[in-house]
Image (cartoon, grey):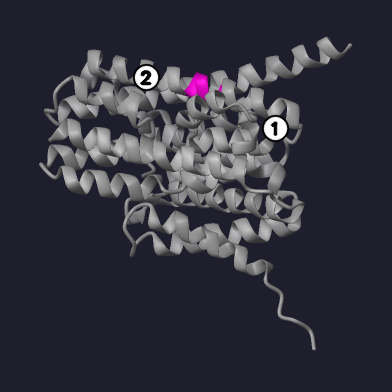
């Protein structure tokens, strides 16, 4: 039963991945529609970042994590290199937790 | 001159890939360790990391599988992964026209691959970015899973390293170029706000999909 569930989840997930990719190849997209799809993806990614930064399950994620993401976000806005953004975010959250901040 | 330019860009891409790969190994290890701690058979995390290859849904599914609820694991996981369809629509062109590349490349489509590909505007480089990031993440996630299974609880808590802040920050950095466009910024921030507000009341996966209502900000009332 466990193996069937994992295969079903894998096949279903792959189907959605491939479905989107193949559909993109089939559609004759105008420039405006391509822009719309890019904006839709940006909205989904922003939502992932926002919910992952602020929420843990259905509760708020505390202080350390959002603070780390905020530091990373400010650095990203100042065009800091990717590795600097990621390390600064992680280090901020880790140090705050070390200091006892939840 | 062109080769020099390309070498410099590739080096930057590989450095970014290595950054996210290091974080993926650590989180993959915690996934492997958690699956074993739940008392699931050793092959479960390996099969999931190769066949499902979507971190969030894997954490969700091992919990539900361990609780003896395989049907819920499938449905909750699929709901969480539904966002891959719009991601495929948005960045699928990067894989080019060959069916083989699209069939193989689709499997490694993740949030990070979508974000990296979206951040690359040059049509020739999009394909390289997609495939290099996809292959790097697939490899590092599976190495991490194996380490977690082997080392168990010794892998430690990824939150103590601040990795839970690293992933949202990485996504932010990758969408930052798109957010410099005012229209995209309004759409994305509205969507993110909707998703955060709905997270306490909707099952996992739906709030993020609801971010698509951010596109409604594009609808301008017709002026009379």
What is the number of callouts on the image? 2
Find the distance from the CA under tag 1 to the CA under tag 2.
Answer: 29 Å
The crowding category of the residue bearing disc 1, from other C-alpha atoms within 10 Å (few below 14, some 14 to 19, many at least 20), is: some
Q: Can residue A12 be seen by looking at this rendering?
A: yes
Between B154 and B45, which is closer to the camera in this rendering? B45
The residue identified by callout 2 is: B142
Task: State left or right for residue A16 relative to residue B133.
Answer: left
Picture residue at 47% right of the left edge, 28% below the top: B108
Picture residue at 45% right of the left edge, 54% below the top: B208
Q: Which subunit holds the residue at mark 1?
A: A
The numbered mark at residue B195 is none
Task: State left or right for residue A77 relative to residue B130.
Answer: right
Asked if residue A78 is positioned above or below residue B72 in the image, the reply reads above
Image coordinates of residue B221 in percent, x first then y, are 71, 80
Check the image and name the residue furthest to the right: B1
**Mark 1 secondary-structure assignment:** loop
Picture residue at 58% right of the left edge, 41% below the top: A71
The numbered mark at residue A80 is 1
Question: What span is in magenta?
Answer: B133-137
Which quadrant holds the N terminus of chain A? top left
Check the image and name the residue furthest to the bottom: B224
**Mark 2 secondary-structure assignment:** helix
Asked if residue A87 is positioned above or below residue B179 in the image, the reply reads above
Q: Can residue B20 be seen by looking at this rendering?
A: no
Taken as a whole, is the magenta stretch helix, strand or loop? helix
In the image, is residue A29 part of the stretch drawn in magenta? no
Image coordinates of residue B93 in percent, x first then y, are 64, 37
Picture residue at 39% right of the left edge, 57% below the top: B206
């Amino acid at each position: 039963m466990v193996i069937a569930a994992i295969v079903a989840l894998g096949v279903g997930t792959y189907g959605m991945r491939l479905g989107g990719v193949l559909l993109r190849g089939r559609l004759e997209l105008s420039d405006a529609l391509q822009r719309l799809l890019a904006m839709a993806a940006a909205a989904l990614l922003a939502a992932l970042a926002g919910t992952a930064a602020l929420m843990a399950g259905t509760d708020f994620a505390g202080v350390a994590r959002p603070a780390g993401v905020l530091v990373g976000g400010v650095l990203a806005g100042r065009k800091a290199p990717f590795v600097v953004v990621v390390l600064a975010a992680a280090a901020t959250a880790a140090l705050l937790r070390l200091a006892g901040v939840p | 001159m062109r080769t020099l330019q390309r070498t410099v860009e590739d080096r930057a891409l590989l450095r970014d890939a290595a950054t996210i790969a290091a974080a993926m190994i650590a989180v993959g290890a915690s996934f492997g360790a958690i699956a074993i701690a739940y008392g699931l058979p050793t092959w479960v995390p390996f099969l999931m990391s190769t066949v499902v290859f979507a971190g969030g849904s894997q954490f969700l599914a091992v919990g539900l599988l361990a609780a003896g609820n395989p049907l819920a694991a499938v449905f909750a996981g699929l709901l969480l992964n539904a966002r891959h369809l719009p991601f495929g629509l948005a960045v699928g062109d990067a894989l080019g026209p060959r069916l083989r590349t699209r069939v193989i490349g689709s499997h490694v489509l993740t949030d990070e691959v979508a974000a990296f590909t979206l951040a690359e505007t040059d049509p020739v480089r999009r394909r390289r970015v997609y495939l290099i990031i996809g292959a790097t993440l697939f490899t590092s996630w599976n190495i991490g899973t194996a380490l977690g299974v082997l080392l168990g609880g010794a892998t430690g808590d990824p939150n103590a390293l601040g990795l839970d802040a690293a992933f949202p920050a990485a996504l932010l950095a990758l969408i930052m170029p798109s957010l410099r466009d005012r229209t995209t910024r309004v759409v994305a921030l509205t969507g993110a706000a909707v998703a955060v507000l709905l997270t306490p009341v909707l099952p996992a996966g739906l709030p993020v999909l609801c971010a698509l209502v951010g596109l409604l900000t594009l609808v301008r009332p017709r002026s009379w």
